[in-house]
Image (cartoon, rainbow, N blue to C red):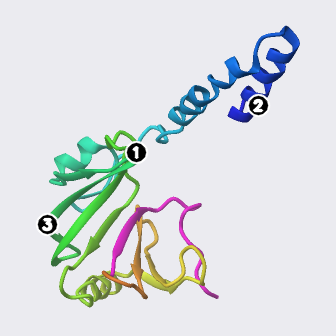
Amino acid sequence: MGIFSQIKSLSLNALTTGRSPARYALLAPWLILMQLSACGEDRRPPPASLKFGDLPVSGTLADARRAGFTACVPDNVSMRCRREAVVFQRQGPFSAAVDLKGSDGAGGFDHLTLWHAADQNALIAIVNELKIDGWSECLTPSGQWGGQAIYQRKGAPVFISMDLSYWSKRRLMVFPAVPAKVPRCRS
């Protein structure tokens, strides 16, 4: 029942029982605070653990820490754990992070993000390695995945997404290759 329905119910109750509506009005702020405290973090279980090479792609906070992602910074609804000097597809070093759900990281993470702090074209070396290794490339249409190059290889447990347009840092993200989550490419 929503907060406004509860307040309306209390007001009607006050009118029908002869009690003072002002008395119930004092309860309204408390009801609002109780409802707001019920709003919170999404508490779904973390995704299954998946590694690609020696890097975690999805899993728990413990998976991230075992892989060296120990520089963790929580905020109100998520936690980012970073690792420096990461090598990916024989290229690097890069900065990397996993973004966990929940301020305590209990919701786990569902992708890995890589970037280079100084050279926005450094990730192109990874893309070249992927192409040499037989990965296909396609571009996404505008929308949620707009401005991305998607890399896939049949039988690979992951797909890779790289920013084509970016404001600050170009990112390369590695996701589990769940068919429903692989973005569609332009035809």
Asked if disc 3 and disc 1 are in contact, CB closer than 8 Å, the reply is: no
Quadrant of the rendered image containing residue 127: bottom left
Mark 3 and mark 1: Cα distance apart in space: 24 Å
Amino acid carrying label 1: it is Ala
Amino acid carrying label 3: it is Glu
Local SS, label 3 = strand
Marked residue nearer the N-terminal end (3 or 2) = 2
Marked residue nearer the N-terminal end (2 or 1) = 2
Decide whether residue 186 is among the magenta residues: yes
Q: Which residues are magenta?
A: 170-187
- The nearer-to-camera label among 3 and 2 is 2
Near mark 1 (Cα within 10 A), the count class, few <14, some 14-19 or many ≥20, is few
Local SS, label 1 = loop
Residue with the mark numbered 3: 84
Residue with the mark numbered 1: 48
The percent coordinates of residue 74 (x first, y second) are 28, 49
The percent coordinates of residue 130 (x first, y second) are 32, 81
User: Which residue: 37% across, 47% down?
Assistant: 76
Q: Which mark is residue 5?
A: 2
The percent coordinates of residue 90 (x first, y second) are 17, 77
Amino acid carrying label 2: it is Ser
Quadrant of the rendered image containing residue 92: bottom left
